[in-house]
Amino acid sequence: MSAPLVLAADVETELVEKKSRFLTRLHGVSEVEQADALLRAARAEHPGARHHCTALVLEETAERAEVHRSNDDGEPSGTAGMPMLQSLLHADLVDVFAIVIRYFGGVKLGAGGLVRAYTAGVEQAVAAATLLRRTELLEARIEVPPAEAGIAENAVRIWAAARGAAVEPTEYGARAALLTVLVDPSDLGDLREDTARWSAGRRTVEVTGRRTADVPR
């Protein structure tokens, strides 16, 4: 199974189909209550819209099961919320809430037309969004004397930039500086080799844990 994707930032797009306006909003959320609040805000902002259809996907956590929800909000059953939800799932998105705000243009689209419009609205918004990959990274630490911290930081940041790894702020103690890198498991061996190279074999990489992080695709 591929790593899921999440939004880097909220996004809004617009689609016009036979004079009906479909405003699609994608929001990053972590709980149902957030989605409910966003829907209330959308209704207050667009009181003249005929429909505010929604789809929600929340990833499974230790506290809850996976959540998949959708709502047609007055559209014929199965023509809005479910196509929206399927579009989110097809895109491998999690922790995302989609709202499609429809202003009716006076021309009926029919069931097939509605499915296509709501699907296209979400697909358009997904295409416009900046997405991050949610993955499990290793927490790798390198301990160096304070006098070597500058050289070590420079070497580690150059290595991390080339591989999309994240470097956390260096922790300084009286006797040592501690560098922490969040690294993909497949890159751990390369990090160890690079560390041995710039330190002439004097420094090693210790794995101290695992962390879930959202990183560039």
Image (cartoon, rainbow, N blue to C red):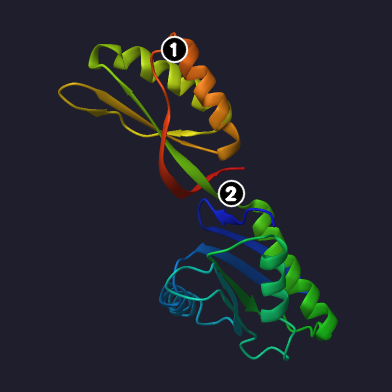
As rendered, which of 35 and 89 lies closer to the eye?
89
| Residue 217 occupies quadrant | top right
Residue at 62 percent across and 68 percent down: it is 23
Point out residue 175 in the picture as x, y percentages from the top left corner: 18, 21
* Left or right, 33 with reference to 110: left
| Residue 186 occupies quadrant | top right
Outermost residue on the left side: it is 174
Point out residue 170 in the picture as x, y percentages from the top left corner: 30, 28
Give the label, 1 or 2, closer to the camera: 1
Any part of residue 15 in sight: no
Residue position for label 2: 133
Judge the density around disc 2: few (<14), some (14-19), many (≥20) Cα neighbours within 10 Å.
some
CA separation in Å, label 1 and label 2 = 33 Å
Residue at 77 percent across and 79 percent down: it is 114
Specify the amino acid type for callout 2: Arg
Specify the amino acid type for callout 1: Gly
* Left or right, 94 with reference to 212: right
Q: Is residue 199 above or below residue 104?
A: above
Judge the density around disc 1: few (<14), some (14-19), many (≥20) Cα neighbours within 10 Å.
few
Point out residue 160 in the picture as x, y percentages from the top left corner: 50, 27
- Numbered disc total: 2
Q: Is residue 139 above or below residue 146?
A: below
Quarter of the image for the N terminus: give it: bottom right
SS class, disc 1 = loop
Q: Is residue 76 above or below residue 128?
A: below
Q: Is residue 68 above or below residue 156?
A: below
Residue position for label 1: 201
Outermost residue on the top side: it is 200
